[in-house]
Image (tube, helix red, strand yellow):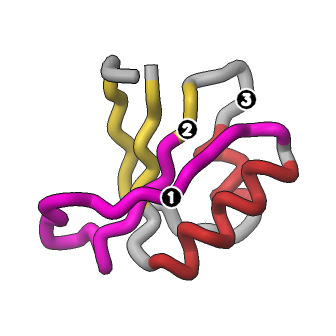
Amino acid sequence: MSLYIKVGSITNAQRARAILQKNSVKASVQRIENPKPGDGCGYALRTENSNKNPVRILESSGIRVLGVEENDIP
């Protein structure tokens, strides 16, 4: 299962990816295809669901999370 963590801007997505990687969480930056109002510039992080809570890691590091979606597609 994958988590898509919406962060809004490319800068925040890159910062968030670096923070997650330092915490041993694999993440990649992806563009949201059809961003909705409130999705910012339309960037998200894709992470694999693990024992660690990537949303909590990002929020405690000062990254604003705009939303989280779960996806069963690998």
Q: Are marks 1 and 3 in contact (CB under 8 Å)?
A: no
Few, some or many C-alpha atoms within 10 Å of disc 1 (few <14, some 14-19, many ≥20)? many
Occupied quadrant, residue 69: top left
In primary-sequence order, the first of circles 1 and 3 is 1
Q: Main secondary structure of the magenta part?
A: loop
Q: In the rendered structure, which segment of residues is drawn in magenta?
A: 24-46
Mark identifier at residue 52? 3
Magenta stretch holds residue 44: yes
Horizontal side, residue 48 vs residue 73: left or right: right
- Asked which secondary structure carries label 2, the reply is strand
Circle number at residue 29? 1
Left or right: where 56 falls relative to 21:
left
- Where disc 1 sits, the SS reads strand
Q: Closer to the N terminus: mark 3 or mark 2?
A: 2
Mark 1 or mark 2, which has the lower sequence index?
A: 1
Quarter of the image that includes the N terminus: top left
Q: How many marks?
A: 3
Task: Work out how far the residue at label 1 is from the one at label 3, CA to CA, in angstroms.
Answer: 18 Å
Mark 1 vs mark 3: in front: 1
Mark 3, secondary structure of its residue: loop
Vertically, is 33 above or below 51? below
Query: Where residue 62 sits in the image (x, y, percent)?
Result: 69, 70
Q: Which residue is mark 2?
A: 47
Residue 47 is situated, as x and y percent measured from the top left of the image, at: 55, 38
Q: CA distance from mark 3 to mark 2?
A: 11 Å
Classify mark 3: residues with Cα within 10 Å, few (<14), some (14-19) or many (20+): few
Q: Nearer the viewer, mark 3 or mark 2?
A: 2
Under mark 2, the amino acid is Thr
Percent of width and height locating residue 14: 62, 70
Residue in view at x 83 percent, y 38 percent: 24
